[in-house]
Structures are given as structure tokens and as C-alpha cells.
Image (cartoon, helix red, strand yellow):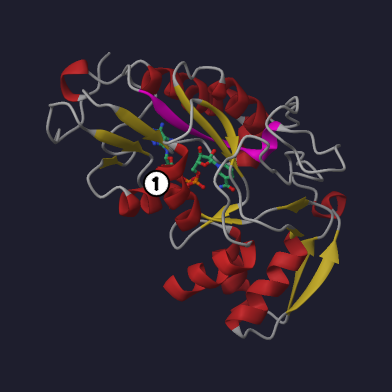
């Protein structure tokens, strides 16, 4: 069955499409690429093919995804439909694709940062479906990033701001390490990625921390008087396993982003 966007905007060449524009990265991309057609899930549910008539475009920034990491464990078919079959429908448009992927394609057992040539070995259903989605891409750029947050949607920064205003103490995991990346910086860097040859690139904020360290930084920057109690992943007991180390770095000349702490300050300034 073909699914047409309700209000197709232009059918000629020269169009950029953004999928998942209702999400945190999609919203940032829509600001950085104001000429693009920013499609929310209501405009295009990517699990349905789009008609060629309404989708002539030369580039797709594919930010739509099933991102509920724990929910994917109990609904692997749902996650597969969006992350794998949805990507297949995006690729079928025939334009080069920027596919945003994740640090969760790695198992976290490496003691150093992961580079592009490291072998993925996802621990979770989400990570597996995102890796399978990478393998759907025929022409374009696979941009792996990590721990995204922005000024919209659900994310760790917004959750901590809420909890920090309500509680004296929050329990936060201190045995997972990554690079929290501000979607505004990732969206800007996408322009530089487009200048690079097609391939896989690791694009994250500089520096790294644990979730507990990130929570402390959020409270400090926001002036919230809330303690962080450091707990383990096992204590938290979430359904999906997560990599202990998911710091990504590039060996392929990917754009370098500002330090995560700078991204945090920029994000807080918008909230
Ligand atoms: N969040 C992270 O920490 C992180 C880390 C690394 C990589 N990534 C990747 O970065 C990309 C953007 O993530 P994000 O953090 O911006 O996620 P997000 O805020 O959850 O946004 C994802 C968007 O995709 C939409 N979507 C879900 N199913 C869809 C479908 N069938 N058709 C069309 N749209 C659909 C969602 O709509 P609804 O809100 O209506 O469901 C949501 O607006 C994703 O590819 C993600 O895998 C994320």
C-alpha cells in the first residue's frame, strides 16, 4: 500500500527530506536545513513506502527511528519495522541518505574509544535493529552518535531538570561511559559530513563522562540543589543491556564537535 504525505511540498529536483522531524534531532536538523521538507511521523510513517510522485529529492536526512531502547526488548518486531524496514523505504526513494546510528551497535567491552573500523556487536534489540538499518543504506553516510539530547522530546537532560527540581536526591548509573551529544551540534556537523565521501563516521561531542557525572553537571549548570547517588546498571535493572563503554571517536576525519559540557550549556540556554 502506498502512503502519500498529506501536503506534498514541491515535486521538482533540489529537495531535501528530513524524516522524524518531530524528534529531538529532526527538530535540530529542520533549523539547520531550513530549505528541507521536515516530515514528522504524521506526515510520513516510514514503515509505509512513499509514492515516487511526491518524493523526488536529492538527499534524505533520516532521523526517524524507534528509539525506545527498553521497549524494543519486548517488541522486537515493532523496532525492526521502523529501524530496518523503515530505512529500506527511505533508501527506496533513490537519493543518498544520512542515516543516524548509535553507539549501542557496540558491546562496550573495549577499554578505548570505538573507531569506525571496530566490529559492531550490539547487546540489545535496539542496537541490533539500528545495525541492520545501517546495512540497508546503499549510498550515503552512516553517522553514529551517542547520548543525544536537545530542547524537545524526552531526553536525560530534560528528565534530570524535572527530577532535580522535585527531589533532593536522584539515583543515577555510574558505570556506563559515553559522550553526551547536543543535537544542535550534530545537526550543524551534518553539513560537514555531506562534504565527506560516503561511509561510516563517528560524530559525537568531545570528552566523555558517566550518566551520574552528566546529572551532576546538569544540576550545577542549572543551579539545582540535588544530590546524585551513584548506582550500578545492575541496581537500576533496566530490560535492555547497555554498553559499559560507548565512547566513539573518528579515525576517518569526521567533524569534531565541541565538548559535551559546552553542548549542555547551549541546550540549557534554550530550555
Ligand atoms: N537518543 C539518543 O540517545 C541517540 C543516540 C544515538 C543515535 N540516535 C539516533 O539518532 C536518531 C534521532 O534520534 P532522536 O534522539 O532524535 O530520537 P527521537 O527524539 O525519539 O525522535 C525519533 C522520531 O522518529 C519518529 N518515528 C518513530 N517511528 C516512526 C515512524 N514509523 N515513521 C516516522 N517517524 C517515526 C518519532 O515519532 P514519535 O515521537 O511519534 O514516536 C520521533 O519523532 C535516531 O536514528 C536514533 O536512533 C539517538
Confirm whether residue 133 shows in the render: yes
Predominant secondary structure, magenta span:
strand
Whether residue 97 appears in magenta in the rendering, the answer is yes
Q: Position of residue 140 (x, y in %)?
A: 45, 25
The residue sitting at 85% across, 61% down in the picture is 231
What span is in magenta? Answer: 96-105
Q: Left of 83 or right of it: where is 237?
A: right
User: Which structural element holds mark 1?
Assistant: helix
Q: Quadrant of the N terminus?
A: top left
Whether residue 28 appears in magenta in the rendering, the answer is no
Q: Nearer the viewer, residue 107 or 3?
A: 107
The residue sitting at 26% across, 37% down in the picture is 43
Q: Which residue is mark 1?
A: 26
The residue sitting at 55% across, 40% down in the picture is 67
Image: 139 above or below 245: above
Q: Left of 123 or right of it: where is 269?
A: left
Q: Is mark 1 within 8 Å of ligand 1?
A: yes
Amino acid at each position: 500500500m502506498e502512503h502519500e504525505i498529506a501536503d506534498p511540498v514541491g515535486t521538482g529536483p533540489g529537495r531535501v527530506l528530513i524524516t522524524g522531524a518531530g524528534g529531538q534531532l529532526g527538530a535540530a536538523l529542520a533549523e539547520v536545513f531550513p530549505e528541507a521538507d521536515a516530515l514528522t511521523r504524521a506526515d510520513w510513517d516510514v514503515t509505509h513506502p512513499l509514492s515516487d510522485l511526491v518524493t523526488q529529492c536529492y538527499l534524505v536526512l533520516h532521523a526517524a527511528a524507534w528509539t525506545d531502547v527498553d521497549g524494543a526488548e519486548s517488541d522486537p518486531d515493532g523496532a525492526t519495522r521502523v529501524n530496518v524496514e523503515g530505512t529500506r523505504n527511505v533508501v527506496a526513494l533513490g537519493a543518498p541518505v544520512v542515516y543516524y546510528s548509535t553507539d549501542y551497535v557496540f558491546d562496550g567491552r573495549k577499554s578505548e574509544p570505538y573507531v569506525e573500523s571496530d566490529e559492531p556487536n550490539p547487546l540489545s534489540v535496539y542496537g541490533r535493529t539500528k545495525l541492520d538499518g545501517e546495512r540497508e543504506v546503499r549510498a550515503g553516510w552512516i553517522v553514529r552518535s551517542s547520548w543525544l539530547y536537545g530542547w524537545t522530546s524526552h531526553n536525560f537532560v530534560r528528565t534530570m531538570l524535572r527530577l532535580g527540581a522535585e527531589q533532593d536526591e536522584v539515583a543515577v548509573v555510574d558505570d556506563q561511559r559515553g559522550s553526551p551529544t547536543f543535537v544542535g551540534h550534530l545537526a550543524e556537523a551534518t553539513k560537514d559530513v555531506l562534504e565527506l565521501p560516503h561511509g561510516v563516521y563517528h560524530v559525537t561531542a568531545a570528552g566523555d563522562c558517566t550518566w551520574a557525572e552528566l546529572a551532576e553537571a546538569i544540576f550545577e549548570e542549572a543551579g539545582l540543589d540535588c544530590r546524585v547517588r551513584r548506582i550500578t546498571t545492575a541496581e537500576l535493572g533496566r530490560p535492555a543491556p547497555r554498553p559499559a563503554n560507548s565512547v566513539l571517536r573518528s579515525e576517518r576525519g569526521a567533524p569534531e564537535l565541541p565538548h559535551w559540557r559546552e553542548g549542555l550549556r547551549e541546550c540549557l540556554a534554550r530550555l
